[in-house]
Image (cartoon, rainbow, N blue to C red):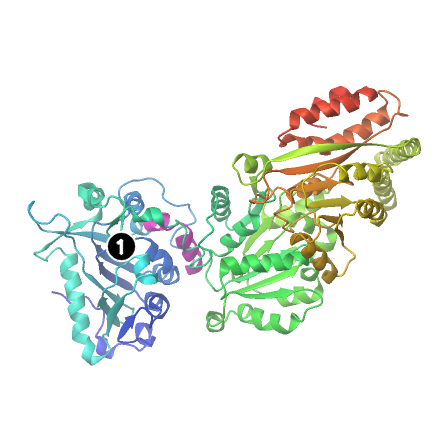
Amino acid sequence: MEDTREADTKTSSRGGLQSLPLDRSYRTGKNDLLEEFYVPCLQQTKRYDRAAGYFDSKSLMNAARGISQLIVSGGKMRMVVSPRLTKDDIQALENGVITDDEIVEESLHRGLTADQFSDYLRHDRFRCLAWMVKEGLLEIRVAFIRQDEIVNPFGHYHEKKGIFTDTHGNQVAFSGSINETELAWTDNYESFDVFCSWRDVDDIRVQDKQQEFDKLWEDKDPNIVIKKLPEAIKEGLKKHSPGTVDGKPALDMFYREDSSAGGKRDKNRDLWEHQTEAINWWIDNKYNGIFAMATGTGKTYTALRAAQLQADSRLTLIVVPQSPLLGQWADEIRAVFGDEASILQCRGETNWRERITQIVNPYRIDNEELIDNTPKHVILTTIQTASGDAFQRYMKFTPPERLQLIADEVHNYGAPTYQRLFNIDAGRRIGLSATPDRQWDEKGTQVIRDYFGNYEFGFKTQDAIDNGYLTRYEYHPIICELDPEEYEDFIDYTKRIGKVSGQLNDKDAPTPDLEEEHEILLRQRAKIKKKARSKPDRFRDFLQSSHPTPVIIFCEDNEQVDAVKYHLKSEEKAFAVYVSEMANEEQEKAFYKFEKGFIDYLLAINCLDEGVDVPNCPTCVLIASSTNKRQFVQRRGRVLRKTEAKDKAAIYDMITLPGLTAEQRGTTARKVIEQELRRAKVLIRSAENHHQVEQKLRTNLEPYGFGHLAYINEY
């Protein structure tokens, strides 16, 4: 038999395999078989010959870092296996060998990097398996035992050995109990002996193993029939493999499909179908895009699972809109990435500057050795910190291919104050928002889309409710009315707004002062409806009614909070206040009391609209809400998360009408009504009781001569 080694092993270079500190034997419990032996050997290998009783593609996935380096370096794998394969692996092999269909996207070709191929392999092993076979990077031959009909039909090829060969001619052979399966390399109790060609005592054994493999490969073993893959598939591979894993029928039913995305971590959480679709979409869009998924449908978890599809040589930066979200994100990161992930939280009052230099510098200088010897790093920060000069300096010069960025509630970052975030050049980018577009701010929206790409993966609230990911809800409008003075003020502001609008339209280049005046007048007019004097009394009526608790109450300002607090105290309700001007510690204390059930009511001003998880809360009251769709959709999302603690949610929304002093069918009265109905119609659309609500609105709008508006869907 011809010796296929590429050089005299005794005089070969000390590079490649010979540089590895290999033991003479490996054993589960004593060694980490993957990290100490398999992956390092693959990373130094030009050709990997493997004979195994069992093979499944999950073994490739678990050793993705090693396999990807082997493939990108132009290496090849030759495998002799028994016909006991999973049905999914057989299908992948059929795709790679027999059909002419396009197996992978155009981007999966020889020019990709090791990191990129590792990502593909971890995320979609079947597609990569087919591609490797199709490209000639993996060649598989199937071993059948020669036997007559009367011989035990369950007997099958069960040999287990492998030979690594590097570019210098060094070889490492191993043999023992281990198969080429995920279970063998990660979960089973295995042992095997190792022989290195540069050791005199081992050289002859390595030659023996190589010659035995070559004899098998060339179908020269009298006891074994070797068939090339196309012929093996056509002539009986399916018949011999009725959904088996390690020879056990249908065992794959008991294993989760995506075990590698979380390694041995987070095994109790499967990806929902729309989350898998989102990750696939992100990969197809070259690792850029926005997850425009309804609040409560798992944007955070989806983003972290997507971020895991990487080698350890990439730094992850996560930016959130406010400090209270840092703790929730840190918990999710630990659950998904595992305890080995190093998380640095950067916010104004912490000493993050002392650590960030140590974390970022190895990536900035592209020092592979330093990066490989450090844990996977995640930098978690607020948009205020990320937009600052200091943080920008620390992130500067980090190579894009070494950095991925997740921007939570990304619609916020189109504001001029926060657009500096987009100076950070990350090779991978994920934006998260249920409502990514900035209403009335096309420029800010375009800045966001310029950075993440002008595309998004959408999963809307109704889809989430229909598929059981979000809880059902009812919508209850609470009718309030402007008093005569408030209505007159509304008319006055409308006239002034009309006058300024006319001036803006007459000018070729509107002055900033005029534009600012227009914005101020719009805000002041909107505040009349938000702060209608009838609202506190209507809130008292709500308190005295039957409603599920706990409750989040969204107010306009401290004056309105004080009025609401008065009624809460009068009714002897336990409550707390959560507003933006409070210190972080006070906010966290208030939220903790609410989350743990020590209080039933939490009052918020421009806080808790987004991001903060209150999954067991079934009820919210919108005392003050704008026509900004993002705001009220996000507020609705606070109570739609599905838990065992609630059967359905309830949204109480104070709808402000003009008051009975308004002229019937008057233009101003219609404007007030249509502004409020813009919000109501969005919230009604997915509510279980939408027909009853429309009837109630019609009854309340009839005195104004606008009852028909209750049935118009858009304004």
Residue 120: give x, y in percent of width and height: 42, 52
Which residue is pictured at 20% across the width and 76% down the height? 202
Is residue 121 part of the magenta span, yes or no? yes
Mark 1 = which residue?
55
In the image, is 51 to the left or to the right of 420? left
Which span of residues is magenta-colored?
A: 112-131
Residue 306: give x, y in percent of width and height: 50, 52
Is residue 572 part of the magenta span, yes or no? no
202 or 134, nearer to the observer: 202
Q: Quadrant of the N terminus?
A: bottom left
Residue 435 appears anywhere in the view: no
Query: Against 513, is 333 above or below?
Result: below
508 or 498, nearer to the observer: 498
Residue 504 appears anywhere in the view: yes
The prevailing secondary structure element of the residues shown in magenta is helix
Residue 243 figure quarter? top left
Residue 401: give x, y in percent of width and height: 52, 60
In the image, is 191 to the left or to the right of 417? left
